[in-house]
Amino acid sequence: MDPSTYTLSPIAEIATPYKQKFAIPRQPGLAKAKGTLHFLPGFDDSNMLKGIEGYSHLWLLFIFHHTIQKGWKNTVKAPRLGGNATMGVLATRSTHRPNGIGMSVVENKGVVVEDGRHVLKVEGVDLVDGTPIIDVKPYLAYADSLPHAQDRLEQYHPIPNRDVIFDQRLAEQLENVNKRFSDFESLVRRVLSQDPRPAYKHGIEDDPKCYKVALYNVDVGFVVSQGRIIVREINPL
């Protein structure tokens, strides 16, 4: 083996409501989406999780498996700068990285047994369904939370906080979906309130285009009208 080359093996895959990259919050913790880590053969040993209940939050290290084959870029467009300004890739959390590795801090919801196997429940995920997890580390408040840390970007565009309204014609469909996924409506509201459209469109208060976002096994269609998000469609995938 080339001593300058290292191989990483996923230890788990995470199941999440996000079936596509579009509309996933740009940082963890913003939508309180739930996730379940299913450990892969060779790593499905409950002893690996001994003591993990002692931490309220965890770091997940993962592979950007949807974009890694596209290679990396030295500069990328930064959504928080409006979507058109560019920055060096190492000054961002872009997916287009030299090694395609990401990290997210999530809330630890505990280890449970499902179908005879130990799985790890988390909340606040920003990962697409099926993302390969390469490591799990405890979040240490005394070391990881730095109250004096700063970023010096003075032109951050604030994350939108739009009202989300469901078309009245969807009442019966929404009720049925909520019976299958108890957090569906609240998740839709949290995800769409952040306006998942491209950042350069956030200044457009009336956008007739119907955008689609896949959550769980449901395709949600929405438009932007007078600054509000209007959910117009709820269809099975």
Image (cartoon, rainbow, N blue to C red):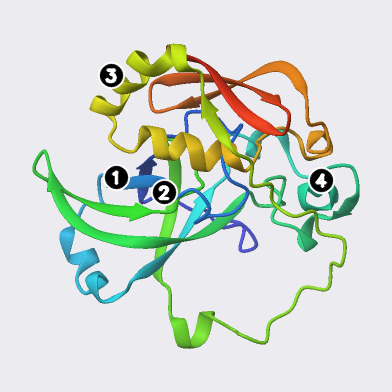
Q: Residues within 10 Å of mark 2 (few under 14, many from 20)?
A: some
Q: Is residue 226 left or right of residue 187?
A: right
| Closer-to-camera residue (213/6) | 213
Front disc: 4 or 2: 4
| Closer-to-camera residue (141/157) | 157
Q: Identify the residue position indicated by label 1 in the image.
A: 40
Q: Is residue 146 left or right of residue 180?
A: right
Q: Residues under labels 4 and 2: Cα distance?
A: 24 Å
Q: Identify the residue position indicated by label 2 in the image.
A: 10
- When the figure is inspected, residue 91 is found, relative to residue 54, above or below; the finding is above
Q: Identify the residue position indicated by label 3 in the image.
A: 176
Task: Please tell me which of labels 4 and 1 falls first in the chain.
Answer: 1
Residue at x 59% of width, y 35% of height: 23
Q: Identify the residue position indicated by label 4 in the image.
A: 73
Front disc: 3 or 2: 3
Q: Amino acid at mark 3?
A: Asn
| Mark 2–mark 1 CB contact (< 8 Å) | yes
Q: Amino acid at mark 4?
A: Lys
**Residue 117, visible in the rendered structure:** yes
Q: Is residue 181 left or right of residue 139?
A: left
